[in-house]
């Protein structure tokens, strides 16, 4: 046993689960016939105990013992933090003073 753990760098695709993130790691696959490279992406589920990573961040992962059925990686550090707006799609169409109750505006 060499004692070193593999490390991967990728982009956070999802952070919806508690203490878990889904990270996309891209790599090149060479075509056997045409000798051209294709970009492929592997989705890794990683353990994020502090919920510090958000969607779009570049992160560094390290291989670890199995934490759950699919989690085999853990977050080491956030390489690059990305700022995303906290505006939800529903908030864009609504005016600032408009109420959330849609039933009041409809007439039967």
Image: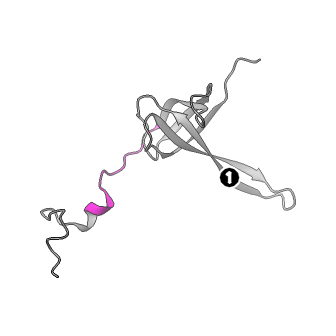
**What residue is rendered at 45% in x and 33% in y?**
19
- 57 relative to 98 in the view: left or right: right
**What residue is rendered at 61% in x and 26% in y?**
64
Provide residue 83's location: percent of width, then percent of height: 37, 46
Considering only vertical position in the picture, is 64 above or below 39? Answer: above
Considering only vertical position in the picture, is 95 above or below 9? Answer: below
Label 1 Cα crowd, 10 Å radius (few <14 / some 14-19 / many 20+)? few
Name the residue furthest bottom.
Answer: 108
- 44 relative to 36 in the view: left or right: left
Specify start and end residues of the magenta stretch as a single range.
Answer: 80-91
Predominant SS of the magenta segment:
loop
Considering only vertical position in the picture, is 36 above or below 24? Answer: below
Name the residue furthest right.
Answer: 33
Figure quadrant of the N terminus: top right
Provide residue 27's location: percent of width, then percent of height: 68, 47
Provide residue 84's location: percent of width, then percent of height: 36, 49
**Residue 89 drawn in magenta:** yes
**What residue is rendered at 53% in x and 43% in y?**
22
Figure quadrant of the C terminus: bottom left
- 94 relative to 41 in the view: left or right: left
Judging depth in this view, the residue of 80 and 19 nearest the camera is 19
**Residue 18 drawn in magenta:** no
Q: Which residue is mark 1?
A: 40
Provide residue 107's location: percent of width, then percent of height: 15, 80
Q: Residue 65's quadrant in the figure? A: top right
């Amino acid at each position: 046993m060499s004692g070193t753990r593999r490390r991967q760098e990728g982009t956070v695709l999802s952070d919806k689960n508690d203490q878990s993130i889904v990270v996309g790691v891209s790599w090149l696959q060479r075509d056997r016939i045409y000798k051209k490279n294709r970009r492929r992406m592997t989705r890794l589920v990683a353990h994020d105990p502090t919920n510090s990573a958000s969607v779009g961040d570049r992160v560094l992962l390290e291989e670890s013992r199995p934490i759950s059925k699919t989690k085999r990686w853990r977050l080491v550090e956030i390489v690059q933090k990305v700022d995303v707006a906290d505006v939800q799609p529903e908030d864009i169409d609504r005016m600032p003073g408009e109420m959330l109750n849609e039933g009041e505006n409809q007439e039967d």
